[in-house]
Image: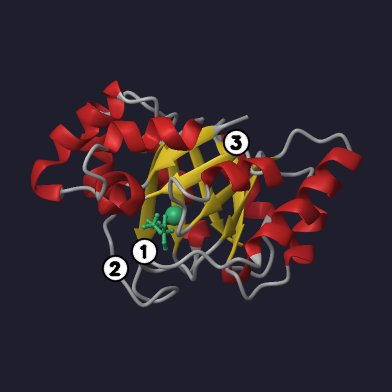
């Protein structure tokens, strides 16, 4: 699968509806929604008040990435606010299972995420429990960072495990994705690529999306 999920974090919030209409017209598959709490990550982005206009103006599924402590307190509200998938960080919780169950009970797709310094093997026990795993290819917190090359081997490792067990779990990559490395990431086994600055910072964002999907 070759899914492109532009990250709204890099959009122009003064003209959000325009940027969302561009996404609607484009070949993008999902809109990636980065929620940061200033505690799990050293940055604060936005929360529920922006879910409403995004759901209203965006025709693409909302792929919500929670970079927050205590995701158990908020996952249900994000489901109710119109999330198509809800992901949270494995390293932010003691036991992800009850939180995954809360999301599943809302009939929303589940995603488990890890930062680059978390051993990718920690995802293995959950591969058959989630719809998707998200490997961060930069440290969560900011857009516009440089892709960490070690991510490539992690993708291959997880892909092999998923295929060996004949699972349908998707692999999403987030951070430093651009028109230069997208093809290589898909070839390594990624199913979905998040791209913020490479889309919204491009002279022609729709063209950038098209190139990444190729
Ligand atoms: C980083 C976020 C990413 C970010 C990606 O914490 O999770 O989704 O928006 O931005 P780029 O594509 O610019 O690295
Ligand atoms: Zn993200």
Q: Nearer the viewer, mark 3 or mark 1?
A: 1
Q: Nearer the viewer, residue 165 or 79?
A: 165
Q: Nearer the viewer, residue 146 or 160?
A: 146
Helix, strand or loop for disc 3? helix
Q: Which residue is mark 2?
A: 44
Q: Which residue is mark 3?
A: 105
Left or right of 209 on screen, residue 90? right
Report if residue 74 is visible in the image: no
Q: Which residue is mark 1?
A: 36
Instruction: Mark 1 and ligand 1: say if the CB distance to the nearest ligand atom is below 8 Å.
Output: yes
Q: Are marks 3 and 1 in contact (CB under 8 Å)?
A: no
Q: Looking at the image, which residue is at 23% across and 45% down?
A: 50
Residue 179, how many percent across, how many down?
Answer: 43, 45
Left or right of 14 on screen, residue 135? right
Q: Decide which of tag 1 and tag 2 comes sooner along the chain.
A: 1
Q: Decide which of tag 3 and tag 2 comes sooner along the chain.
A: 2
Quarter where residue 171 is shown:
top right
- Crowd band around label 3 with a 10 angstrom C-alpha radius: few (<14), some (14–19), many (20+): few
Seen in the picture, residue 7 relative to 210 is either above or below; the reply is below
Quarter where residue 203 is shown:
top left
Question: In which quadrant of the rendered image does the N terminus lie?
Answer: top right
Helix, strand or loop for disc 1? strand
Q: Decide which of tag 3 and tag 1 comes sooner along the chain.
A: 1
Q: Are marks 1 and 2 in contact (CB under 8 Å)?
A: yes
């Amino acid at each position: 699968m070759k899914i492109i999920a532009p990250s709204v974090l890099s959009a122009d919030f003064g003209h959000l509806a325009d940027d969302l209409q561009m996404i609607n017209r484009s070949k993008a598959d999902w809109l990636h929604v980065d929620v940061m709490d200033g505690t799990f990550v050293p940055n604060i982005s936005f929360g529920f008040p922006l879910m409403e206009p995004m759901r209203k103006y965006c025709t693409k599924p909302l792929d919500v990435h929670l970079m927050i402590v205590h995701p158990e307190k908020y996952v249900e509200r994000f489901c109710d606010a119109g999330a198509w998938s809800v992901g949270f960080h494995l390293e932010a919780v003691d036991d992800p299972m009850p939180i995954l169950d809360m999301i599943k009970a809302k009939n929303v797709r589940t995603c488990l995420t890890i930062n680059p310094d978390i051993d990718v093997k920690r995802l293995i026990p959950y591969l058959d429990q989630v719809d998707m795993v998200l490997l961060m290819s930069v440290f969560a917190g900011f857009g516009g960072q440089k892709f960490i090359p070690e991510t490539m081997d992690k993708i291959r490792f997880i892909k092999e495990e998923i295929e060996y067990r004949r699972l349908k779990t998707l692999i999403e990559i987030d951070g430093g994705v651009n028109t230069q490395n997208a093809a290589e990431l898909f070839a390594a086994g990624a199913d979905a690529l998040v791209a913020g600055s490479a889309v919204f910072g491009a002279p022609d964002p729709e063209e950038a999306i098209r190139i990444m999907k190729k």
